[in-house]
Image (cartoon, coloured by chain):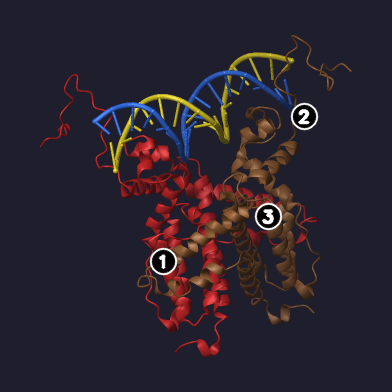
Chain colours: A red, B brown, C blue, D yellow
Amino acid sequence: MPTARPEPGMPTPPGRRPRKAAAPRRPLTQEAIVETAIRVLDAEGLEAVTMRRVAQELGTGPASLYAHVSGKDELRELMLDRVAADIMLPVPDPERWQEQLKDLAREIRRVYVSHRDIAMVSMGLIPTGPHLLDVAEAQLALMRAGGVPKKIAAMAVDTLGMFLDADAVEGTIYYAKTPAGEDPHAFFEEYFGQFKEYFAALPADRYPVLTGMVKELTDADDDGRFEFGLDLIVRGIASYVEDGERPG
Amino acid sequence: MPTARPEPGMPTPPGRRPRKAAAPRRPLTQEAIVETAIRVLDAEGLEAVTMRRVAQELGTGPASLYAHVSGKDELRELMLDRVAADIMLPVPDPERWQEQLKDLAREIRRVYVSHRDIAMVSMGLIPTGPHLLDVAEAQLALMRAGGVPKKIAAMAVDTLGMFLDADAVEGTIYYAKTPAGEDPHAFFEEYFGQFKEYFAALPADRYPVLTGMVKELTDADDDGRFEFGLDLIVRGIASYVEDGERPG
DNA sequence: ACCTGAACACCGTTCAAGT
DNA sequence: ACCTGAACACCGTTCAAGT
């Protein structure tokens, strides 16, 4: 045992000051950095994931991260790809491709939302990470199995991705705004109630249509909105399947 | 003329040091702050719009802005609403509501994209500004004139908004990434070319479908993608119009 | 009422120096 | 090769003090 590391539980001998507080248990690796960043993300949201904060959590300074990660943007992309690994992918069944595509979209939503506002990273990003590409491959495989032309499938994977990103960001943004320490649900209720009042008080002469449907506009539940948009998109994609091309 | 302000063109008399460099020409108002912020946005993107930067542009310190604006978030919302004032709104023609809704979407896209990544502010925001509400009112009016049920119209305005936001953000993110001083078009060409190579080099056994349609995936032009998604959404909305409810 | 300087508590990234 | 402390050039917001 040539290491000078102190035995756990033993006090520091006099005059033998430890370097900082506690040496990082694990040597710094890209994996450890990404894991730690995701822990911070889950606990406090994407905004809290700073180079300094992640470094602190690992018991070092921010400069140390740059040996394993090129910067903040790369760290964010690595986090997203790591999260994408949790998305369960279907085995294509050409008979049921539309329902399978919807289920996959729901699964992506589930995983994204379970990691706060991680979807923000996906917005405007061309996927290059292995797991993100697995997800794209699965979507394309379902559509192609269903007879969707290549050109259409290529654009549809984009449109669906935009929808999923926007929905996940939209859905988590209120939680992100919840002041630390407050109950997110109660805050949300409060927050949303204010908007109902605001819309109801709008001048009817300037906004005749809007003020005539305040109830419909403010009652829209998240899941209903998601299912509505998803159905629109999947039905739209299906409309491009030429009858002869459809297997089964 | 009781003011001690120096005559323009005159040098500062000895021993009469001016407060800073030059006094702000206009007194600070919310309007002037928002205008200045939009000028910075147009020139350098949303990220460059900081309280300190806007203050500097107005010849003051950041603390001075807080008398007219509650903080950075409010300033961003005010900027978005100001920009939304430029969106030209249609007079509903029930016969052509689908084409009018598409045209309005194209107009929103045009205005958003002409102000860099301003759409980022819209993402996950419940519209409350007068001009943003005008736009929502116009969309709802078109759909209602076309016979779309209230409940559907309420959700559709949300879905369409998500699509427009995601598209505008997606479309400007590359420009936002262009290093200062470089030609955006040349950078974009370079940047995108690298992705083509990357996709072409992907392992075909793990990504069989994807690697079989690299051309379709990387050729997708922005406008084509937008029109595809827009058509999907508008056709989807139209499918909810009950035949009896349609005027004409 | 409005504006200010200074301060507080943060950022991402670089770099020379250490091991 | 990896890690570090210190520095650089920034952030948003608050607050006591001025006019």
The residue at which mark 3 appears reads as B112
B60 on left or right of A191: right
Q: Which quadrant would residue A104 be assigned to in this image? A: bottom left
Residue A108: percent from left, percent from top: 44, 64
| The N terminus of chain B: image quadrant | top right
B128 on left or right of A133: right
Is residue A72 in view from this perspective? yes
- How many marks the image carries: the answer is 3
**Disc 2 element:** loop
**Disc ID at residue B27:** 2
- Label 1 resides on the chain identified as B
CB atoms at circles 2 and 3 under 8 Å apart?
no
User: Please, what is the three-letter code of the amino acid marked with disc 2?
Assistant: Pro
Toward the viewer: A107 or A7? A7
User: Please, what is the three-letter code of the amino acid marked with disc 3?
Assistant: Tyr
B149 on left or right of A221: right
Q: CA distance from mark 2 to mark 3?
A: 29 Å
Callout 3 crowding tier (Cα within 10 Å): few <14, some 14–19, many ≥20: many
Residue A242: percent from left, percent from top: 55, 86
- Label 2 resides on the chain identified as B
What residue is shown at x 18% (from left), y 25% (from top)? A12
User: Please, what is the three-letter code of the amino acid marked with disc 1?
Assistant: Ala
Q: CA distance from mark 2 to mark 1?
A: 59 Å
Callout 2 crowding tier (Cα within 10 Å): few <14, some 14–19, many ≥20: few
Toward the viewer: A27 or A177? A27
| The C terminus of chain B: image quadrant | bottom right
The residue at which mark 1 appears reads as B201
Comparing labels 2 and 3, the label whose residue is closer to the camera:
3
- Label 3 resides on the chain identified as B
Q: Earlier in the sequence, mark 2 or mark 3?
A: 2
Quick check: do tags 2 and 1 share a chain?
Answer: yes
Comparing labels 2 and 1, the label whose residue is closer to the camera:
1
